[in-house]
Structure formats: C-alpha cells, structure tokens
Image (spheres, grey):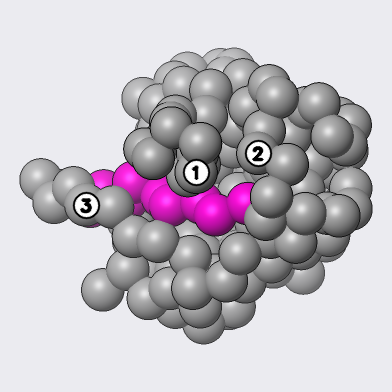
C-alpha cells in the first residue's frame, strides 16, 4: 500500500466543514475497497509507514472523510495525518509504503451522531448525514417511522454518509439505524425523537451504544 498527501478534505462523505476539523484534521480519503460506496465514511484506522529511520511506532490515527485513489494508494492523507507518520523528512517522499488496521472510533464516545443535512427543506424534504459511529461499526441503512402507515420506511443513501427522505412525517421524526460489524447486522433505534420543527444543521446524539 502507499500514501500520498491530501489537500482537499471534507469531500465525498458529505461531512462539509466537520470533515475539515474532525480528529484535529487528521483525516484521509480511501480507495474503493475501503470506501464501500460510502459505508466506510467515518471509519477509523491506525496507519504506520515502513521506513524504519523515518517512521514512528504508533503512526497516525485517521478518520475517513472522502473517497480518492491515485498512485495505487489505499489512503490519501491530509497534511496533518501525514505529518504524524514520523520524521519531517517523510514529506519529500509524497508516497510511502504503509501498513494499516481498522481501530475503534472513540473520540466522541460509543454513540451514533448525525446532523440534519444542509440540503433539507422543511417540511417536504429531510436529509441527514451520519457524522460518527462509535467502535468499529458501520451504518448500512437508516429508516424512519411512519405513524400513518404503522411501519418503518427506508431512507435513501444519496451519497457518502448522506441519507434522505421525501415528504417526511409532519410529526416528530423517529429514526433507527442498521449497523454492521464483520458478520453482525442489527437495527438500533435512537432514544430521542427529532422535533417536528426540526432545523437544518441541528446535530443529534442518539445515545445508542451499538455494542
């Protein structure tokens, strides 16, 4: 595997400004096999380079915020992430061989956090972006409770970590999330409903621990 410095951050996950500041700016774009059509958004990795005299033992702890490939790389790192791999002289390489492993996301606890996406328009169009999933879980689906129909109905993954629903409930909004880890797959429901007068940009911690 190889690495390259990433200039643009925030990108294809739909994180916006959050994608530029999360984890102290130590973020990465990843290849298709780690991107997984957006399911890989927000995943956390430990990355270490393999030049003994220049690389430190712990490497960099990065959060996936974008999709990108180049020079046969699995990761394209932000400058902040690349600098944490080791000695300053690494910067002259641009692309370096690395090893990596998936690690639990813990910087916001063990929870699922989402935000009402900026494209939403009350009351006819509702979209969210899943900003954070604790541990090593991934969000593979989101559903909204439709009280009139007495059933859960799926939101559409539009891109990255963004899900939407046309003509949402006019009452408070209840969501549940399908989370996966390895072969495990289950639904978890937010403990809190979104008020009927929801606002664009509002952020919600579900207080769910997927474990």
In the picture, the disc for residue 186 is 3
Q: Secondary structure at mark 3?
A: strand
Residue 22 position within the rendered picture, expressed as x and y whole percent measured from the top left: 74, 63
Q: Which residue is mark 1?
A: 147
Sequence-wise, which precedes: disc 2 or disc 3?
2
For the residues labelled 1 and 2, say whether their Cβ atoms are less than 8 Å apart: yes
**Residue with the most extreme left position:** 183
> Mark 1 to mark 3: distance in Å?
22 Å
Give me the residue at 52% from left, 29% from top: 155
Q: Quadrant of the C terminus?
A: bottom left
**Residue with the most extreme front position:** 148
- Nearer the camera: disc 2 or disc 3: 2
Of 107 and 116, which appears nearest the observer? 116
How busy is the neighbourhood of tag 3: few (under 14 within 10 Å), some, or many (20 plus)? few
Q: Determine whether, in the image, residue 104 is placed left or right of residue 53.
A: left
- Asked whether residue 180 is drawn in magenta, I would say yes
In the picture, the disc for residue 169 is 2
Residue 23 position within the rendered picture, expressed as x and y whole percent measured from the top left: 69, 68
Sequence-wise, which precedes: disc 1 or disc 3?
1
> Mark 1 to mark 2: distance in Å?
8 Å
Q: Determine whether, in the image, residue 24 is placed left or right of residue 119.
A: left
Residue range highlighted in magenta:
173-181
Q: Main secondary structure of the magenta part?
A: strand
Of 147 and 95, which appears nearest the observer? 147
Give me the residue at 36% from left, 38% from top: 151
Give me the residue at 39% from left, 40% from top: 150
In the picture, the disc for residue 32 is none
Q: Secondary structure at mark 2?
A: loop
């Amino acid at each position: 595997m190889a690495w390259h410095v990433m200039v643009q951050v925030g990108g294809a996950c739909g994180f916006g400004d959050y994608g530029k500041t999360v984890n102290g700016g130590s973020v990465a774009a990843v290849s298709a096999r780690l991107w997984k059509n957006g399911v890989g958004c927000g995943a956390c990795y430990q990355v270490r380079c393999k030049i003994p005299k220049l690389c430190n033992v712990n490497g960099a702890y990065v959060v996936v915020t974008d999709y990108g490939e180049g020079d046969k790389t699995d990761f394209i790192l932000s400058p902040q992430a690349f600098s944490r791999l080791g000695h300053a002289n690494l910067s002259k390489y641009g692309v370096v061989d690395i090893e990596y492993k998936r690690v639990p996301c813990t910087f916001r606890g063990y929870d699922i956090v989402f935000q009402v996406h900026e494209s939403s328009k009350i009351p006819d169009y509702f979209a969210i972006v899943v900003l954070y999933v604790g541990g090593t879980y991934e969000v593979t689906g989101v559903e909204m409770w439709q009280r009139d129909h007495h059933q859960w109905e799926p939101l559409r993954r539009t891109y990255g970590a963004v899900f939407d629903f046309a003509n949402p409930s006019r009452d408070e909004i209840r969501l549940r999330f399908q989370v996966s880890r390895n072969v495990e797959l289950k639904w978890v429901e937010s403990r809190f409903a979104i008020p009927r007068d929801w606002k664009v940009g509002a952020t919600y911690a579900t207080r769910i621990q997927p474990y």
